[in-house]
Image (cartoon, rainbow, N blue to C red):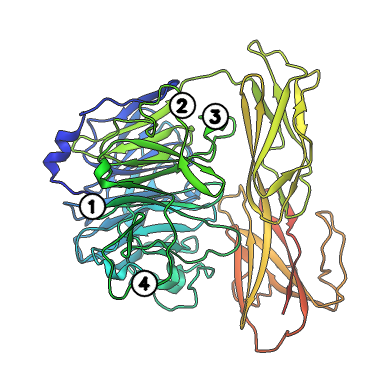
Amino acid sequence: MLRTPAIALLLAVGATAQIVPDGFTVDTLLSDSLIRPTDLCFLPDGRCLIATNSGTIVVYAGGAYGAIGAVPSVSQGGESGLLSIVADPQFATNGHVYVWYTSTLDASMHLDRFTLLGPRTAPTSPNLTLDVASRRVVLDALPNQAAIHNGGSLRFGPDGKLYVSVGDDADSCNAPFPTSGVGCVLRLDVAWMPSTPSAVAPTYSQLDPGTNPLSANTDVAQLVVASGLRNPFRMEIDELTGNLYVGDVGEALSEELNEYVRGAGNPVLRDFGWSRREGLQPGPGCPTDPTAAPVDPIFAEFNAAGWKSIMAGPCYRNRPQVSGFGPSYEGHVFVTDYYSGEIRRLVKSGTAWQVATPVAGQPATASWATGFTNTCALRMGPDGCLWFVRNFFFGEIGRIRRNSVQNGLLAMSGNGQRVATGDVFPSPIVVRALDALGHPVANTAITFSVQGGATLQTPMPVLTDATGHAQATLTATAAGGPVRVFAIQATNGATAAFDLYVRRLTATHAAPQLSIGIANTTDASPAQVPYILLTGFPGVASLATPVGSLCINPTDALAVVMEDGVGVFGGVSLSGNGGTGSPSLNVQYALPPGLLTGLSMRFQAVGLDPITGWFRTNCASIQF
């Protein structure tokens, strides 16, 4: 990432004041107690874990803080060190964190898992300890021959998979090729790993979710979802869409921000063009470069403009029940640069991304904020603020927050619903408008909008009734996945937000393999959901149940139970998976050639959520 001696970094600190738009404030949360912080992550209860270059991990708990231990065998200097940290989505149950670092043990990059001891749900407690003896190796064979261009970021996606951005190890000619294991983004399944320590890394096949683009391979390529990257030091993932935003540090011409569009179904392989291209300019190139056109970056800035080490920031999402930046920022992507200290705000217009229109108090036309030199991580916190890490000798953790505003629109009911694709959400989304004294506001216009796999059935806008209430009904679409609903009060811009989910079963056939995927979510911890997966031959009867109609009656002679994680049908598992998801499920079946040719088969599942009980998925069909 870095391009100048360490002394230059010290001289750059404090060179300019931090300027943010009107209505925003910069809070310095932790400074002189940090030496070269590199990354941060958040625990489910809101506490912040901070990685430092030396390997030491610090916890920040609402003002209280302290070092909780150090990752062993971390090599330091230049671009080496402890580079990234992320908490397991099930941290409240398992206490696991993952770290990405350069090691003194060998010339490979290391991804390890550790367990933190201490209270796992205590927002104000800094009393955590890194259990060094709990180390479980995840990856230990990705090359680190050059000691530069190491990447990288560890981030969990909304699909529950762990994504890792990996640098090209200063070998640009290998970057386009997934089999090299460099210049890429990896997608790993780590939920299955036992809680016990292990010094032996799993095989690539064990880490492969089974739905990656090159899952048929038997090498590191089966973990790769993106290639053609130089040094993707910082990457963020949109919590709603699962899209990846990857900042790729350029060589001498341009910095670039790439968007990996996750889309519905299984991920596809994308090539972002290094080394035949740098930003939107021709790159140095290699004799073995692919000829296919790469994916264009959504943002590029010339090094001559002062941008020399780009850092991807988050796709902003307003938090339900929390005062965030507001609807005008929803879905916007933030990006910064280590050297320029500018923060840009990008908005999508049609199919193209562009720098957002300036807001009041913005320091420059293109720059939403300035003065953030040495920022090496820009993340969205659970409080709706932008948190940042400034990396220098006495480092800094801070946040950009919106000043308190009166929000007169309350989310009353309808949040958290989960249905199958095509279903109507059973409860309407209900908000209530109140004035500054808490009195209901009648006959005021509320506009609901939806992001994700659902559509509104209620004409907009909706006028509040005499008690200040307004509501809207939604239907789940075939897209599935997370859904976020916003309500905006026209008179004052007050907002409320709701998070819902659409369960989606997909079935695909690429001879000889049949793949079934069930996208799901749960509040249970651990997130283990057993399924009964059914298929039916033509003519199979349907069945009415308390959770909705099943297109396949499991007792019909033309029905086959493929997975039974519940135990109702003897625990059968034709895939060997066992029929239990965490909470999503992906299973594959090798079909003999010609077995089902010409048949149209239907697939559906019922699941047993440990908290909410039985549910069903949609019914999917395949013509073989």
Residue type at numbered disc 4: Phe
Horizontal side, residue 293 vs residue 254: left or right: right
Residue type at numbered disc 1: Gly
Under circle 4, the secondary element is loop
Instruction: State the image coordinates of residue 293 (x, y, percent, origin top left).
Output: 43, 66
| Residue matched to label 3 | 326
Disc on the earlier residue, 3 or 1: 1
| Residue matched to label 1 | 81
Horizontal side, residue 563 vs residue 93: left or right: right
Q: Are marks 4 and 3 in contact (CB under 8 Å)?
A: no
Q: Is residue 445 visible?
A: yes
Distance between mark 3 and mark 2 Cα atoms? 13 Å
Q: Are marks 3 and 2 in contact (CB under 8 Å)?
A: no
Q: Nearer the viewer, residue 281 or 155?
A: 281
Distance between mark 1 and mark 2 Cα atoms? 38 Å
| Residue matched to label 4 | 177
Horizontal side, residue 336 vs residue 493: left or right: left
- Circle nearer the viewer, 3 or 1: 3
Disc on the earlier residue, 4 or 1: 1
Q: Residues within 10 Å of mark 2 (few under 14, many from 20)?
A: few
Horizontal side, residue 353 vs residue 564: left or right: left
Residue at image position (23%, 53%) is 252
Under circle 2, the secondary element is loop
Residue type at numbered disc 3: Gly
Distance between mark 4 and mark 1 Cα atoms? 26 Å
